[in-house]
Amino acid sequence: MTLLNIILKMAEGLEKTCAIFFLTLLFAIPLGMIVALLRGSKFKIISAIARVYISVLRGTPLMLQLIAVTYGPYYLFGISISRNKLIPVVIAFTINYAAYFAEIYRSGIDSMPIGQYEAAQVLGYSKIQTFFKIILPQVIRRILPSLTNEIVTLVKDTSMAFTVSYQEMFTIGKQIANSQTSFVPFVVTGVFYYVFNAVVGFVMGRVEKKMSYYKI
Amino acid sequence: MKKRVIALVLAALIAALTFSLAGCGTAKTPSTDAETSGQSAIEGSIKFTMGIDPEYPPFSYLGDDGDYTGFDVEICKAACDYLGWDFNVFAVNWDQKLIQLDNKECDCVWSGMTILDSMKEAGYVISRPYFDNEQVLLVKADSGFKSSADLAGKDVAVQLGTSGESLLNDDLKDLADIFGNVVTCDSFLKCFTELEGNAVDAVFVDRPVADSYVAEHDGYVIIDEDLGAEQYGIAFRSGDTELCAQIESAVDALVENGTYAEIATKYTDIDEGNLILLK
């Protein structure tokens, strides 16, 4: 197998890796915000539930969560294991990353000085308006570096989908390495992940620049 | 206060480090030098580590008592006992087994391993074959699949890094092409889970593994079409010819004194007709 063939084959896997990456971001970013808001709720029960959620999802390995989401429904309720592994994989990644995102959001929200809320109240903003128009944009600006960190980690974590037999990029790399008894496919895999993350880093850098308007 | 805490933490770290180092010291066999490879010292208590796939019953698996066991493990243990060697088991990551062997994490790979030409070409020392194997398709009894042709367009699971996987990529490419999807799992037990949970329609697997699974679980049948006849052997690092010869002669002695046959009878899933050394 020539280098070009290896790269082409890996590109097929890249598509599946991208599917996990984008779908997870799509669902986890809003879900994380919901969890963060629940975590900060005045109602003790709701806040406690959110705390337990974060604690469990951060406290257990993602690999275990993948196995639990994929095979759990079958062992517990006899529901057939999904043939399209993307569904359980994205669910597992989403609930896991939402927990991390929630804590990042919370760090941003808590960092906002109370004076801004008071000033907004004086100016006649409602609570919802205050949050979305004044607080949130500044929060996003502040948490972007930590968010980039998590997103970069997500790119690399997608390789864990192999545990539940989802054929993403890393799996394909391993398969080629096996059949060729060569180390080259692993190098190619490394380059693919690096380039992917370089793009993520570049995009996030641009977003940060755009958001610098909200810097205090 | 703060300083005391730091001092305590440091003390604990140093203590932990010392203990772990001491632990390493005792784990090493006294008579051999730093190299743990069995080949480096012939006399004395040689530490011999066999590399196994821990999820490959009946050849190698985690027994009910929490120790690794299986046909290959018991034979290797008996061979080490015969040679007076210190026997150890190391569970390899099957798709990285040869890299781990080169890395001296184990001294051989002996775990229902199919002899492939590519291994010989890469310079590994391979023992005489000891088992005749073939690939079969394991399906659910109520699925109604009777032959590989029935599986056209269906999903088939195979373990990554096994000979089954290489066959489907190579000699049996035609067969792989009629399947809908070939799903690679990281262990056979996961392949079987996928089959059980209806995520795939069949598992492409070595005959004895399938036999063992069928014997223990109801509702499965084997489609046997003489696919991919092959043989099992033991892989050693290149240059370990002497080590390979020592193990082979120890196994020969076990065959002669009847230990080999005795162990074989314990594993009813292994068809004695396929054990080359007993022929």
Image: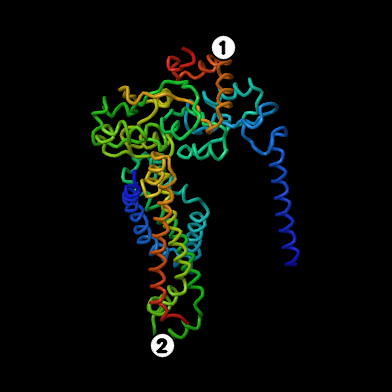
The residue carrying mark 2 is A123
Relative to B267, say whether B12 is above or below: below
Q: To which chain does the residue with label 2 belong? A: A
Which of A49 and A199 lies nearest the eye of the viewer? A199
Residue A13, label in figure: none
Residue located farthest toward the bottom when viewing the structure as drawn: A123
Relative to A75, say whether B256 is above or below: above
Please, which colouring scheme is shown? rainbow
Q: Dot 2: few (<14), some (14–19), or many (≥20) neighbours within 10 Å?
A: few
Q: Is residue B75 left or right of residue A138?
A: right
On the image, which quarter does residue B173 sit in? top left
Q: What amino acid type is highlighted by mark number 2?
A: Leu
Q: Residue at x 51, y 80 (%)?
A: A113
Asked if residue B74 can be seen in this view, the reply is no
Which of A46 and B128 lies nearest the eye of the viewer? B128
Q: What amino acid type is highlighted by mark number 1?
A: Glu
Q: Dot 1: few (<14), some (14–19), or many (≥20) neighbours within 10 Å?
A: few
Residue A36 in the image, given as x and y percentages of width and height: 45, 66
Q: Nearer the viewer, mark 2 or mark 1?
A: 1
Q: Is residue B258 left or right of residue B142?
A: right
Asked if residue B250 can be seen in this view, the reply is yes
Total marks drawn? 2
Asked whether disc 2 touches disc 1, contact meaning CB atoms under 8 Å apart, the reply is no
What distance separates the C-alpha of mark 2 from that of mark 1?
96 Å
The residue carrying mark 1 is B256
Q: Secondary structure at mark 2?
A: loop
